[in-house]
Amino acid sequence: MATKAQQHKFVNTADEHQQQIIKLLREVARYRGLDQTWSDWVEMGAIAIANAVDKSQFESREKRYLDIVAQYQKEDVNLLVRAFAHLVQCWEQRVTSGEFGDVLGSTFMMMDMGNASTGQFFTPYEVSRLMAGIIMSDHAAHHQAQLQRRGFITLQEPACGAGGMVVAAIHALVDSRINYQQALHVTAIDIDRRCVHMTYLQLALLHVPAIILQGNALSLEVFETWYTPAHILGGWSSRLREQRAVGNVDQLLMPEIKHAGGESSLMEPVQHVVRAIQKGVEVGQMSLF
């Protein structure tokens, strides 16, 4: 557990928008606790973005959103909205400056929520940046070939946390002057719903075409599926189907995913996930395929 002096130091290393997020969430947390407030905040933000584009899941998510809002006073909801506005501004500032970083993961740790009781510790971005640089460098020839052959590369992360490793990989692509918004598709999975919401928010705000799954990378169960706006608006469902049709079929196909209400057309791109997850579990971390 961090001391008060350490907490003060962490907050001082935050940028202006992160400091405002911390201040606002701590103000709201006086009633429901910091851990619950953070979880509600990232879920509300994820739902707000998803419901603007993913109409197939709109009703259930809208109900969930209203259930969360009902637990807060109006003035506290306004504070949560202000905190989200600072998150958007933080990412705008970082993308413009080329700094990137794991905004939500680092903010979470600055608020001293990464401890033994929660069981969540997010890797410092500097470490993720180094690891992603090594992985991307090792696969440089491969993803250049993929870019030339089909116009994009695919990346999967079997234990995404807050999405820091994926952001670091994006950072590496930017350094290589590759437009990740057009040349990259991400599939990320985590067992923890809060991590899924955090990753979704960060990739959505970076306009990354991505599918984020709440599921178990070991048992290969999938419980929830989140599509970023860039995935839906960019027609990536069709692009991924075309990819499976033209090559690498043996690596990308899996048995059909069955649901009680039938198979949703939006679930079709997820059919390549199981093999990708299995590969990721074998190497223990992010991989390109």
Image: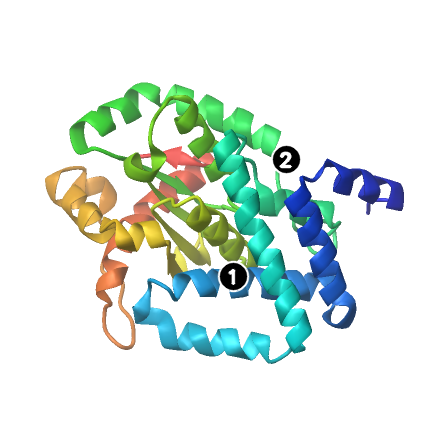
Residue at numbered disc 1: 45
> How busy is the neighbourhood of tag 1: few (under 14 within 10 Å), some, or many (20 plus)?
many
Q: Earlier in the sequence, mark 2 or mark 1?
A: 1
> How busy is the neighbourhood of tag 2: few (under 14 within 10 Å), some, or many (20 plus)?
some
**Relative height, residue 165 to residue 86 (above, below):** above
- Please identify the residue farthest to the left as the structure is shown: 246
Q: Are marks 2 and 1 in contact (CB under 8 Å)?
A: no
Taking depth in this image into account, of 131 and 28 the one nearest to the observer is 28
Can you tell which of label 2 and label 1 is closer to the viewer? 1
Residue at numbered disc 2: 124
Residue 4: x and y in percent read 88, 46
- Res 246 visible: yes
- Res 164 visible: no
Relative placement, left or right, of 50 versus 86 is left
**Relative height, residue 262 to residue 257 (above, below):** below
Relative placement, left or right, of 8 versus 272 is right
Residue 283: x and y in percent read 44, 34
